[in-house]
Amino acid sequence: MKILIIGGGNMGTTYARSFLRSHITDKDRMMILERLPEKAEALRRLDLGAVYTDAEACLPGADLIILAVKPQDAPALFARIRGIVDAQQVFLSIMAGVRIRTIAEGLGVQKIIRAMPNLPAQIGQGMTVFTSSDQVTRIELVTVQNLLNTTGKTLYVENEDFLDAATAVSGSGPAYVWFFMQAMYEAAREMGFSVPEAELLVYQTFRGAVDLYNKADLSFEQWIRRVASKGGTTEAALHTYEGTTLSEHIKEGLRAALQRAIELGRQE
Ligand SMILES: NC(=O)c1ccc[n+]([C@@H]2O[C@H](COP(=O)([O-])OP(=O)(O)OC[C@H]3O[C@@H](n4cnc5c(N)ncnc54)[C@H](OP(=O)(O)O)[C@@H]3O)[C@@H](O)[C@H]2O)c1
């Protein structure tokens, strides 16, 4: 299977690297299409496969085409390649907010998979939620899922609306985690720890908590109860959080992200 990635930016190169690193494909079957010659030249130096700036030279030979340009560049891209795509080709779009119907109408194709990855895909620790049009066969879907699995975990959803919800939870999610880490870091600094000490304390606490959570079949609430003994320090902190409705604010943030994802999808 020949793969063409359109847009060799952050996500495009992340995908190319992941596919090659996992040996699910090789450089002879990997192509990247970029817009500007200078960028194409820089990409060639990364040695991730053949790099093109001319769609006619690469698109007709591709079985799977990954759309990894910014959502705002999609209309121009669709207009540019509409005449050279064919109905048997499978399209995997990772463009945030661009709906399957928009891609189908823009390109005149029907085999479309839409995925929402997140940034830790860069280190093989991503979370990708994906869905597909009815015309994608089971084999094509499994093939694409295997490719996505090289960047972390994946979850298939039947209903495309869940991609907006996934954008709010896992797509934007790493930023919420870093926001909480930043607040803890600032508190640690106020308590007198140096910058590297505060960073270490916060980073290792998050890492340890996540790894521990993975080791046993306990819910988040059960783990909290394990740390928070009666009358202890953790309980004192948790009481304060409950008093300030922190949990409600976090949920409110996710709801705002969902609303924005829906709005962006409607703006096309
Ligand atoms: N970054 C994330 O964490 C993340 C997470 C989930 C989803 N996504 C989605 O992933 C997509 C890519 O994001 P990114 O961060 O990788 O963006 P990026 O770094 O800007 O990469 C996009 C690349 O596509 C190129 N491009 C634009 N139009 C093109 C065309 N017609 N033909 C060929 N190449 C073209 C751009 O070139 P120029 O610079 O010359 O415009 C740029 O190199 C976006 O749609 C985003 O919504 C990203």
Image (cartoon, grey):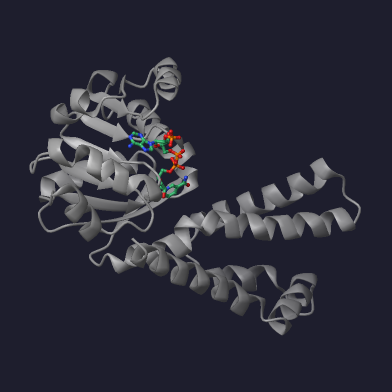
Q: Position of residue 102 (x, y in %)?
A: 24, 57
- Residue 60 in view, yes or no: yes
Which of the 4 image quadrants contains residue 158?
A: bottom left
Query: Is 3 displayed left or right of 19 in the figure?
Result: left
Quadrant location of the N terminus in the rendered image: top left
Where residue 218 sits: x, y (%)? 50, 67
For the C terminus, the quadrant is: bottom left
In the image, residue 169 sits, relative to residue 241, either above or below, namely above
Q: Is residue 27 left or right of residue 60?
A: right
- Tell me what residue is drawn at x 35 percent, y 41 percent: 68
In front: 262, or 115? 262
In the drawing, does residue 97 fall left or right of residue 136?
A: right
Q: Nearer the viewer, residue 103 or 193?
A: 103
- Would residue 181 appear left or right of 131 to someone viewing this image? right
Query: What residue is rendered at 31% in x and 68% in y?
Result: 161
Instruction: Indicate whether 56 appears above or below 71.
Output: above
Percent of width and height locating residue 91: 21, 44
